[in-house]
Amino acid sequence: MLDVFRLAWFAVRTFFGVIALVLALYAALWLFVKILSAAPSNDEPGAALRSVESYNSQAASRGRATAAVPHDRSGTCPESRSARCEQP
């Protein structure tokens, strides 16, 4: 009879332990996001796009073929590559 209570106590402890673990992970992730969102950012809007365009222009000037499809920011693709581009 004592084994039944021992098993029940183990099940209750395990259940609440798993709940506590999930809540601790949730709190840690929430804190991580809060810290990162409060950090000052030196990035300007469009900095990544300018970096990619700069890299592509440098590669083109060296005679290398670029993997990126040029984008004219209007949502359309150049006619020479329109088969590979998705039209909006």
Image: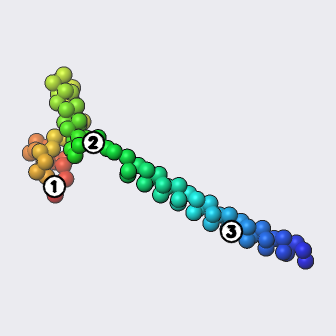
Q: Amino acid at mark 2?
A: Asp
Q: Give the residue number, with chain letter if any, for mark 3.
A: 15
Q: Give the residue number, with chain letter if any, for mark 2.
A: 43
Q: Secondary structure at mark 1?
A: loop
In the image, is 10 to the left or to the right of 44? right
In the image, is 78 to the left or to the right of 26? left
Residue 64 showing in the rendered view: yes
Q: Amino acid at mark 3?
A: Phe
Between 53 and 31, the one nearer to me in the picture: 31
Between 65 and 16, the one nearer to me in the picture: 16
Alpha-carbon span between mark 1 and mark 2: 30 Å
Q: Which numbered circle lies on residue 76?
A: none
Percent of width and height locating residue 10: 78, 68
Q: Quadrant of residue 69?
A: top left
Percent of width and height locating residue 22: 58, 62
Alpha-carbon span between mark 3 and mark 2: 45 Å
